[in-house]
Amino acid sequence: MVSQTPRLAVAGIEKGFPGIKALDGVSFDVRPGEVHGLLGENGAGKSTMLNVLSGVLKANAGEIRVDGQRLDLHRPGDARAAGIAMIHQELQHIPALTVAQNLYLGRPLKAAGGLLVARRAQEARAREILADLDPTIDPARPIHELKVAQQQIVEIARALLYEAKIIAMDEPTSSLTPSEFESLAALIERLRQEGVSIIYVSHKMDEVFRVCQRATILRDGRFIATVDLAETSEAEVVSRMVGRDIQHERHVSHATATPALRVESLGDGRMIRDASFTLHRGEVLGLAGLVGSGRTELLRLVAGIDRARSGRIQVNGQAHTFRSPREAIAAGIGLVPEERKKDGIVRDRSVASNIALPSMRRFSRMGLIRRRVLRQEATDLMQQMNLRPPNVDRAIGQFSGGNQQKAIIGRWLAADVDILLFDEPTRGIDIGAKSEIYDLIEKLAAQGKAILVVSSELPEILRLSDRVMVMREGQIAATLAGAEITEANIAAHAIPQSKRRGRSLAAEPA
Amino acid sequence: MSSKMTDTTDATTPARGLRSVLPASLSLRDAGTLLGLVLILIVFASLNPVFLTAPNLLNILQQSSINACIALGMTFVIISGGIDLSVGPTAALSAVAGAALMAAGVPVPLAILAALATGMACGLFNGTLIAFAGLQPFIVTLGGLSLYRALALIFTGGNPIFGIPQEFRAVINGDVLGVPVPVVIIGVIAALLWVVLNRSPFGEYILAVGGNQEAARIAGVPVARTKITVYVMSGGLASVAALILTGRLGAADPTMGNLWELDAIAAAAIGGASLMGGKGSVVGTLLGAVILGSLRNGLTLMNVQAFYQLLATGIIIILAMLIDRATRGRG
Amino acid sequence: MSSKMTDTTDATTPARGLRSVLPASLSLRDAGTLLGLVLILIVFASLNPVFLTAPNLLNILQQSSINACIALGMTFVIISGGIDLSVGPTAALSAVAGAALMAAGVPVPLAILAALATGMACGLFNGTLIAFAGLQPFIVTLGGLSLYRALALIFTGGNPIFGIPQEFRAVINGDVLGVPVPVVIIGVIAALLWVVLNRSPFGEYILAVGGNQEAARIAGVPVARTKITVYVMSGGLASVAALILTGRLGAADPTMGNLWELDAIAAAAIGGASLMGGKGSVVGTLLGAVILGSLRNGLTLMNVQAFYQLLATGIIIILAMLIDRATRGRG
Amino acid sequence: QDLAPLNSDEEPDRMEWSELDARFGELPAPEAGTAVGGVSKTLTNEYWRSLGEGYENLAQEYDVKFAYQAAPSEGDQLGQLSIAENMILQGYDALLFSPQTDNNLQPALETARAQGIPVLNVNDAVIPSVEHYVGNVQRDNGVRVAQWFIDNTEGGKLAVIEGQPGVFAAGQRTDGFTSTIEEAEGFEVVASVPANWSREQAYDAASTILQQHPDLIGFYANNDGMALGVVEAVKNAGLQEQVAVFGTDGISDAYASIRAGDLTGTVDSFPVLTGEVAMEVALRLVAGQDLPRVVATPQALITADNIEQYAVEDTAALRDTLLAQ
Ligand SMILES: Nc1ncnc2c1ncn2[C@@H]1O[C@H](COP(=O)(O)OP(=O)(O)OP(=O)(O)O)[C@@H](O)[C@H]1O
Ligand SMILES: Nc1ncnc2c1ncn2[C@@H]1O[C@H](COP(=O)(O)OP(=O)(O)OP(=O)(O)O)[C@@H](O)[C@H]1O
Ligand SMILES: [Mg+2]
Ligand SMILES: [Mg+2]
């Protein structure tokens, strides 16, 4: 074991971006058949490390060896040729192409002497590979018709296609449900046994401890340690990641009896039917459900992004029909969207500008923006939220996902809305920032804000919620309060009726 | 799990149902364009008896063929996320190059090759600046618009080149089973391009580069090569159009191709190409070119006065896009 | 922690250092454009003694002012992610509307307002179709290009309108402390627009809409209103250009503004606007317009023949973008 | 001095080009170092290059420094204005303007006037306030072709292929043709459509018109380039025996086509000769002569019948031919 050449050896990697050193002498190695965690807070440099590995970014210094062989990376194809495949944090696909075409993009199976794409063959192979992951995905469908989770699965399948020796996974489960994680974990185990090495990036400690043998911890671009997970506790890992201890606080309720938002029989004519609920001031209402159950859609209706076809919305006792998000914002509703890059940020603008967008009136006087006031307030806000690097003049696109999320939340704090809708608020967010965001949500509730949180992570729902609504197939299936809020209870309501029947029938003979 | 399956199937059924009614090669979007064309045909046919006669319909196809040829190249460029404003001058330059050789007695096939090479060289120049220097396509080809026109004018001193061999002209002005040769040429090219776009790896690359360039790069798509190739194709197709026109007119004019880029972009856009890239269709572009051709033909037949022709053109372009939008909204 | 702080500061120092030397309003990108202009000025000055004289420099500014005016509007449209091909015909339509009123004896200020209203109405039409019907800007304004030209021609019967009051002409042809009035007007407008883009909420909205429309919408940006406003601005600025030109020419021609859109786009692009939206600068566009004006002026002074002027224009546009690219790469 | 807006066709203060020597004596030798600048509409059309050739001929003969510039493209009104203004800065003794429109060179004219530089408007669009104009009568182009049809045919259907909508020359030529022909018996203009000076669009328009009116007897095109496109369309339709095609300008390709029996005729306005006359007038103005406001230059309908008479390289011989009429 000791004398064994590592499958992958990374030594002294440095990578700088304008104004920041994202990687500063990172070294670690990965053994054959090992699942190796790469851990760190948002912005620690995990994605950058993987991008260097896969040839997407060029390192400023350092070397990479695969099976002892020095690797020269000039273009993405080079890493792949050396047996490295990567699953990117941001979904990387071409909307107009089918699932199979996306899988084989860049190296299609060819027919007619290489002139044409062998579509049938591609689709057949794709079906085989997808069978292990999610057999419901039709390889002939355009990828943009799939749900986000399914798109993520296609991304994973693409790495399998290359029969790589090393697969780097950058937060592969950020949009997967627990059950989908289970299939992934099984798959990883199988690959591992076949001798494939896997680098696994995740903010979810339980997953990391489930699938990884060892882990390398990065902080601010620097190598901190490589630890054997069997001999380390979660708390220890986290404290080395964050550089301090994280206390797990228990849920405290600030709920009042004053309704802030009352939704009655809301529907969009497609997916959402007859949704009714009341959200009180100071309350945190969890919204659980399976992926695809329509939680995002419901939030979009309430936030005025999509037009409701039926139903009523009352804010602080006043009826509204939102024709645009602007109207919803004016009524005091703000949404932290699920797809940050697409629906959240304006890449090239500064953090301050992104924060100020809904509150322009407040930040301007006589038609002009008070830049100094804006910068000061944005800086204060972001300091509280521990933005890294703490520079609100930088373009938001240059921040890590977690830090972008802080800015988007900051946007609504600056706008001082009464009702906050969070769609997967901690997706892709590190454990330190996560507890910061939880504290923040609690603090907002304490200030009397009404909060609706959609999350696919049950622990998160349990940690935050005063009450929990469960969505099923576009309808609110149950509202749980107090002692009813248990993982089992939520799961029971989340599973569609047809499926329960189907399962019980199938289960009985066995 | 099984319920999810049911769910998914349910959601896609209506679209699939409709799709299965149409021929496989005709997308829903193209059907919308076709509808627009049919509407225009009906309007003109009811206004003028000559319009819907076979000779006039062939006439329309013939008159649309030049624009269709340019627009097909433009479609590929647009799908890749670019634009080519230099098609007119590229056509002019390759026309005068080819014509000068023909007039000098060089064998016709050789002259044709030279003309094609000229057009492709212009495209190569555009494509290289765009792919390697990373310049904006709009500006590079705006520069090319001046550059190639200037070269054509300087080369000829501003005079058209006559003396196109009769054998060449006879071929271009001939017909195949009653269909004018230019229409046949464009038909064949369009069929080839359809295969390239929809069935070849290169077609996928174009869609990928236009749809999400970064993702394409990461997936190992040869982004630069793909971009350069679409501009070379556009240049080559401009040469084809130039040669057809030279054959028809019996002369190669260095001022050839004025404003062709706008007609071509209009045809591609009416046919469903999105200037944001990643979207576009060969069939749609052909239909778009025929819509514009029918429009011009119909207005001329009805002897609409010059100013009102301009008016009608503007209105129809906007109407076509509105109709398109309305039909697409559901598709 | 402290080491990290040092790190960050260290890395940002060079950029900060450079930036602190420049006036706050001049971005690094604009400095690149300025450098390009200076290079061109040096070349021409060394080739021709007249070039760098005060009257000729004023001449260049005066000649660039129309294009600068149009290009400023275009810059806002481009930043918002659109394009306006209809600026020339918009100018023509508002010129003939204003001139007809002036010639009919309507008080000059009223006629000016009417001209501005006409241009803004054209912009409103474009903007509405783009923002509400969701049509592609390129195509809508391509339609507008035909439509407004046709309206101007029909309105005037194709004839220019003379009889512009002397008082109006005198103002436009006058000067303020030796600086021609058109230059002063554009200067004032540019200063206002700089404030709008860089200091007003609307400026943030434009940048956000051009940068990521969906995110902007969700963040409460009035997307439709923002888009419509930029087209109305572009139309209004086209009217301003039209009025200046009408004053200078003493007549309003329905064919005014031919090809203005290309010059304006070129100026904006040289000045750093990205046709993908979300990027662009008022100062850059002004510099871009002056670069194009200097180029034309210098080539004429050196008596370069028309075809070669065209050649030089093409080459310079591409060179400017290459230089820009090279300087920006580091910025 | 307030001049009445010029109408070059009707201005009473006019003279024929042929009378210059007789009325004002031989052209006095210009002072050494005299420089004249010409600003033309475009060089992409042979007509304007020939005009420049005429300017150059005389400039060389009299050892005058001469620069000839043109807008980069037809319709680039502002570009032409800039060029004209830039030329004024260079200190020419006289300027020859062929403006894109009636007014786009107005500011340059005013600046030149303020500096005491004589400006000559040569052909095509007419600047209303110009003091000197040399050129032919645009309307007359169309009139002459119409007259040919009236004289040589029994009547029938005719079509006009127009230049760019809104351009002065296009409007005048079309109007001359149409109004003359409509006064005659038995003629009908069945189509009058624009082809924007483009050979290709003229071809398309002509083929479409022939679909609708296979019994057409003739086309009048606003310039020769379009006429040559029409000729091809007529040939393609196999109607060359029945359909007469006329152009305007008299470019060399039109002559060649007439000789080949394709084009029926063109109205030649003799650009080289016009250029020479214009330069002569300019030099006379520089010399201080007081000439009439308009100097008219010749024009002739060229057909196969008289082509050899006019197809001469040497403008002296052409002068003789024209003077003989
Ligand atoms: N293209 C870029 N330009 C400038 N800075 C960048 C760029 N990409 C990343 N960075 C910076 O590099 C640092 C490391 O980013 P990276 O994306 O690697 O973090 P991460 O560990 O993957 O974080 P997360 O857990 O949030 O995904 C961050 O500070 C980020 O702001
Ligand atoms: N990109 C897309 N294109 C088309 N339809 C989509 C897309 N994304 C989602 N949908 C549709 O919306 C429905 C719900 O999507 P989504 O998966 O976002 O649900 P959700 O309940 O919000 O789950 P989660 O928030 O956990 O992702 C899906 O059933 C799917 O049909
Ligand atoms: Mg990351
Ligand atoms: Mg969702």
Image (cartoon, coloured by chain):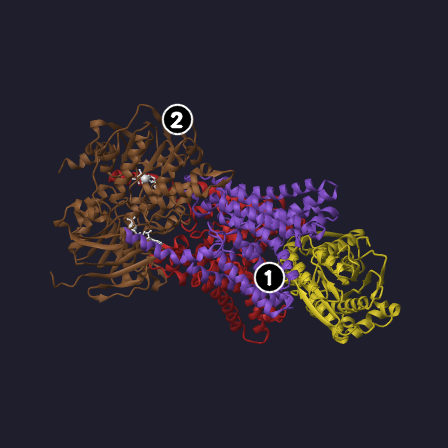
Chain colours: A brown, B red, C purple, D yellow
Tell me residue D96's x, y (percent). 74, 64
Q: CA distance from mark 2 to mark 1?
A: 62 Å
Task: Give the amino acid at mark 2.
Answer: Gln
Q: Which mark is residue A314?
A: 2
Q: Secondary structure at mark 2?
A: strand
Task: Give the amino acid at mark 1.
Answer: Ser
Residue B12 visible in the current orientation: no
Mark 2 or mark 1, whichever is nearer to me: 1
Residue A171 visible in the current orientation: yes
Q: Which mark is residue B311?
A: none
10 Å crowding of disc 1: few (<14), some (14-19), many (20+): many
Q: Residue furthest right?
A: D23
Tell me residue B102's x, y (percent). 57, 73
Name the residue carrying label 1: C294
Residue appearing at x 43%, y 37% in the figure = A359
* Mark 1 close to ligand 1, CB under 8 Å: no
Tell me residue B149's x, y (percent). 58, 65
Answer yes or no: are tags 2 and 1 on the same subunit: no
Q: Nearer the viewer, residue C316 or C127?
A: C316
- Chain letter behind tag 2: A
Image quarter hosting the C terminus of chain B: top left
Tell me residue C210's x, y (percent). 46, 47
- Chain letter behind tag 1: C
The relative height of residue B120 versus residue C213 in the rendered view (above or below) is below
The relative height of residue C306 versus residue D104 in the rendered view (above or below) is below
Q: Nearer the viewer, residue B235 or C67?
A: C67
Q: Quadrant of the rendered structure where residue C102 is?
A: top right
Image quarter hosting the N terminus of chain B: top left
